[in-house]
Amino acid sequence: MSALSEEKLDLPATAQPVHPDYRVISLIVGCAIFLEQVDGTVLATALPTMARDFAVSAPAMSVAVTSYLLALAILIPVSGAIADRFGTKRVFNSSIVVFIIGSVLCSLTHSLPMMVAARLVQGTGGAMMAPVGRLVILRTVDRKHLVSSMMWTLIPAVLGTMAGPPLGGFIVEYFDWRWIFYINVPIGVLGYWLVRRYIPVVTCTVRPAPFDWLGFALCSVGLGCLLFGLELFGENTSPRNGVILVAIGAAACLAYVRHARRREHPAVDLTLLRIDSFRLSVISGALMRITQGAQPFLLPLLLQIGLGFSALRSGQLILAISLGALLARALTTRLLRWIGFRRVMVYNGVLAGLSYAVCAFFRADWPFWLMFGLLACCGVIMSVQFTAYNTIAYEAVPTERMSAANSFYSTLQQLMLSVGVCCGALILKLAMSASHNSEPSRLNFSVAFLVVTVISLSSTHWHRAFAPDAGHEMSGHRQR
């Protein structure tokens, strides 16, 4: 069977293929996300140790995080097009292989520039895993099961975030940090086998549209220059290079907007923003994800550098966020059915923003159980909020535009997480500069957490713009 005929975008209702139970498909896709989550959370715990080995300051390690997220943001827009041409199953499995190769390269690095290059390779694989995996779900799961399917997908992802921090702390404390990348190999091999064994291949009769190479180039230049420009703003050197990169990035993004208006099938379909629920989810979720990106970068540094905790102790505390997210799995569906998407996002969104602010007040003499409990509550609140975002975005998207919507949404998601890391590092460096510190103090971290909290709270305006009955078919909520 040819690559062009491996995927079906629109199947008649009378000719639906028999797929495995949606829970099985969701859990397998979740295993790929598990691989990414373990890698990310383990890396966060190891950043201070890696900074010492590379002879750089701890905030400078933000580029090791943003380089991976940058690869995701640049390549995610083409994930849907590549899946359309070569088949979701084939692309999904190939992405796991590339991710494993990148992980091995990361373990062999001896400097920050080498790490950045290896993380870009790793991000190339990661750019396909999550969005193509989500595309598998969108194309094989009925809409009535979509909320439940997303919940099942998040179970392995949450387990990954749970295992990552204590595992990373243990490895850094008793072994070499390079082993945090080797653990991806057996997990990746297992994921590769599960995809080959259980993920269905759906035949295709629709020829994909011509790929938008110019649009892809403009997006890549725009996003890359914007993110690395933000990185340079926080460096001790002149910000001139940062200003130049940001200007080039902004110009490329504006050029893409003009280009997309004239092309029938652009790399990122901006006309999707005309769909109210999609547009509002993108904007409000973007503001919240800036803070969501900053927290996993700032929190391990706060615990290890600001409060003087060991890597193992830090990993144990960060585990609380994942435990809270896991507890939220049983709560979210009932909560959405009870009060609806709009109220959940409005009220829970305020709590989510304030939960970030709690970290600004942590002290070394606080009881362990108190910090653990607060971070667990933070995990519950954030999990509910992002589950709502990730589901309501697709409420009114036509089936034939799911691939484009998935690429667009995933791109913005990774981009804003990258911006969050850049903003967290920049605010921290500015606070250090204002207090004339060569290493960040606890007060510097407090300033950074409070600033990103304000960014999260600004999303409330957009939450209130959702229709009162938004997502009622997905949640089962009915207005009284």
Image: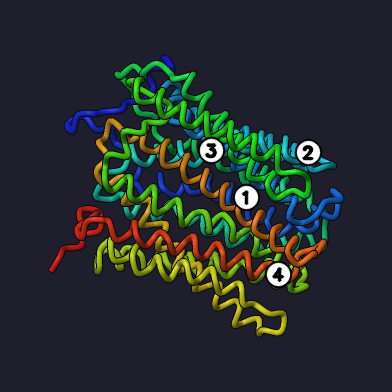
Whether residue 472 appears in this view of the structure is yes
Q: Which mark is residue 303?
A: 4
Distance Cα–Cα, label 2 vs label 1 = 17 Å
Q: Which mark is first along the chain, 3 or 2?
A: 3
What quarter of the picture does the N terminus occupy?
Answer: top left
Q: Quadrant of residue 314?
A: bottom right
Q: Nearer the viewer, mark 2 or mark 1?
A: 1
Q: Which residue is mark 3?
A: 73
Q: Residues within 10 Å of mark 2 (few under 14, many from 20)?
A: few
Whether residue 125 appears in this view of the structure is no
Q: How is the image coloured?
A: rainbow
Which residue shows up at 61% across the image and 34% down it? 225
- Amino acid type at mark 4: Leu
What element does badge 2 sit on?
helix
Q: Residues within 10 Å of mark 3 (few under 14, many from 20)?
A: many
Q: Nearer the viewer, mark 4 or mark 1?
A: 1
Q: Which mark is residue 113?
A: 2
Which residue shows up at 60% across the image and 38% down it? 246
- Amino acid type at mark 1: Cys
What element does badge 3 sit on?
helix
Q: Which mark is first along the chain, 1 or 2?
A: 2
Q: Which residue is mark 1?
A: 422
